[in-house]
Image (tube, rainbow, N blue to C red):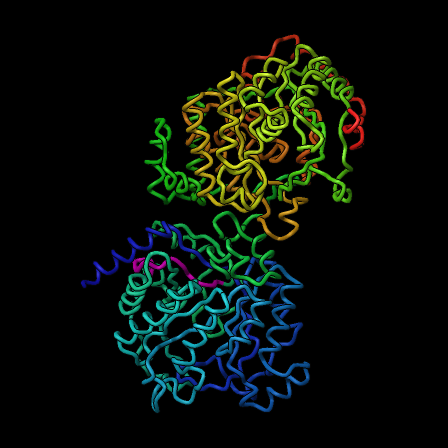
Amino acid sequence: MPMHTLLAGAVTLRREQHGNRLSYSRKVFIPLTRLCRDVCGYCTFATTPGRVSSPYLSPDEVLAIARAGEREGCREALFTLGDRPEARYAEARAALAALGHASTLDYLVTMCALVLKETNLLPHVNAGLMSEEDMMALKRVSVSQGIMLESISERLCEKGGPHYGSPDKHPAARMAMVEAAGRAKIPFTSGILIGIGEMRVERVASMLALRDSHARHGHIQEIIVQNFRAKTRTRMAEAHEPGLDALLWTAAVARHVFGAGMSIQVPPNLSYEDFPRLIEAGIDDWGGISPVTADHVNPEAPWPAVPRLAAATAASGCTLVQRLAAYPAYALDSLTWQHPDLAQRVAHAVDSEGLARVDRWVTGVIMPLPPEGRGDAHDDALGPLIARASGGARLGEEEIVRLFSARGADVDLVCAAADDLRRRTVGDAVRYVVNRNINYTNVCTYHCKFCAFSKGKQHEDLRGRPYDLSLTEVSRRAAEAWDRGATEVCMQGGINPYYTGETYLDLLRAAKDGAPGIHVHAFSPLEVSHGASTLGLSIHAFLERLRDAGLGSLPGTAAEILDDEVRGIICPDKLVTAEWLAVMRAAHEVGLPTTSTIMFGHVERPLHWARHLQHIRDLQAQTGGFTEFVPLPFVHMEAPIYLRGQSRTGPTWREARLMHAVARLVLHPLITHIQASWVKLGPDGARAVLNGGADDLGGTLMNESISRAAGTQHGQEFPPTAMEELIAGIGRVPSQRTTHYLAAPEERRAHSFQARPLADLVQTPFIAQRHANA
């Protein structure tokens, strides 16, 4: 096959799975010991006891390196060391005894544990040849492991070969370790070393052996193609180094052998100034790059600085992204691939695509926003997708996922397009409604893993005790809201086991008694379903009773993620997707408009976001009953699923921006209003997404308790004066509205700007007997 055809095919395969991204891991290199029992003919990493100040790094030295890396934003601690030096050197045995350890691997386990305890770095270990038992011990304290096969050729172990006298380099032993890693479900790194005397056919044979192992276990997360570099003071100091063409050929063959899904890595520092050309071979990863430590295996070849690496990657039409030591697929499935003690650390360190969280922004926390993308956009597919969406076309799942995959300057491109569409669709007005939240009970029989609001007898140690508002208090709060200029009360609560459909009707009447002119926006689809079942009514019949009693609209909550794979994890006893959609359809059919929502940033992925948006769009095309779409970033701090280490730490800022922008594009022209949740994003975040496709700030709320219970710091009320100052501050036009997106009456608006302070709340304690006697 001609070289240009081979390379072009490799690039096509890479794009199929990895798009225009090249990843790297920001790391520190910790050479725990440079002593080794092997005597490879090309190695300068391994040395003798007389040439080092100490056989092993001390715990303080290990920690100093790790902390230096942590300060520079590193996420990986790469432990590299020689094979079992205690088998060869008395000095190594004595040093281990002084450290209180019987073996090098025992000491390595302790040092990995120390780094985990004292820093946020995640260890990856290249510890040479190990047994399955050794690997399992290290799995408790490392997120991934590796060993280079180097070559399947036994010929290289013969006298005169580079591996002669090195028992740990025997191919059968190395492949046995690769197999053991697969059985142990350890995310594993392997690869080949070219230019050490092997033939091309042996390179391919090495790749095929690794491919077969991966086919059995699915555990090899990356294949490294490394080129031999001749080093002084070695047996191979005068050996011929492979040229760039040989490296490109081998990397491209690796892509063809392993396919689109495998990550193929070539270290950039070993190609010096020519490293950008490696992208021509279809690679998708640069390996570990350290801003702190040298490449101790190849000290003559410094890593390119990350800004230079990013610039060279961008010049090749690709985007540099940061990963963890565990690659995305293994990080996203951390409960399978990491020890339970580490799964939580991994889940908290990644974004929705399994890449490293690279900013510190967290939903609900008062903190500066991260900087936005810089430079040129690189994903040529985005332009046509944006054009199709802006023209009203229904995008497919993969197309929506592609929009959500935007990174760097591509994020700005998507957000700018969404903002332009917003301007053309609804103009420069930013709308908000003066309303009050009334959460009448926090007692709930459901066990949603994301919820910190609902309480039961066993949850009194969480935020607040179980309560159940009296109808008098509901009526008082509605009246007070009306006096303060509200046009709406939003009423929702937990699924109280003592509530029936009549309870919901009573709550509705109480609100209308307190404020006859107020719009009641109430009852999630789950509450509607519960109420209907207790009365033996169909969903339609119960909604008609609610409508006739004064209900004006329904909140589109309890949607979370409209995909049953995700719902089975976060809310397994809740309505399934089809049931949620059926309640919304019924509401629209009986004349009750609803909002629509998504709660994102926990366990779901962009594919699930795409499916959710398609469900919303498709139902809107049938009924036209959704008034707006409300992205709700997951607030993780007090959520049970987070505290158990089973979720991410909410969306990243990139994901929060994209959710509002992509929703604007994907739902166009069927849903015209995209709302920013100031409770979760904060004022600064709300400003930003208003400039990225959103046009609505939601409600002033007066009392916000659900997000507050989850840990948000952004307050309980955003009064009209503050709303309008924020809107005017970004050059937009404030517009106080009703629930139905009509202009608020001037009398209501005047009252809203003259509101008196709220009276103290009366949280009626939950008493089951009160319901039993009702």
Q: Quarter-wise, where is residue 687 in the image?
A: top right
Q: Which residue is drawn at 50% across and 53% down?
A: 332
Give the magenta part as a residue range. 278-289
The answer to whether residue 402 is visible is: yes
Q: Relative to residue 18, is residue 246 drawn left or right?
A: left
Quadrant occupied by the C terminus: top right
- Residue at 31% of width from left, 61% of height from top? 255
For the N terminus, give its image quadrant: bottom left
- In the rendered image, residue 28 lying in the magenta stretch gets the answer no
Task: Decide: is 701 above or below 286.
Answer: above
Which residue of the protein is positioned furthest toward the left in this rendering?
Answer: 2
In the image, taking residue 766 as reference, residue 639 lies left or right, namely left
> Horizontal placement of 227 versus 502: left or right?
left
Q: Which of 162 and 269 is in front in this view?
A: 162
Which residue is at the far front? 536
Please tell me which residue lies in front, 198 or 614.
614
Vertical side of 437 occupied by 458: above or below: below
Quadrant in which residue 714 is drawn: top right
Which x, y percent locates residue 641?
62, 47
Magenta-drawn stretch contains 283: yes
All told, the count of numbered labels is 0
x%, y% of residue 359?
56, 48
Is 711 left or right of 330, judged from the image as shown? right
Instruction: Where is residue 144? Give x, y as percent.
Output: 51, 65
Residue 99: x, y in percent? Answer: 67, 81
Residue 736 appears in the rendering: no
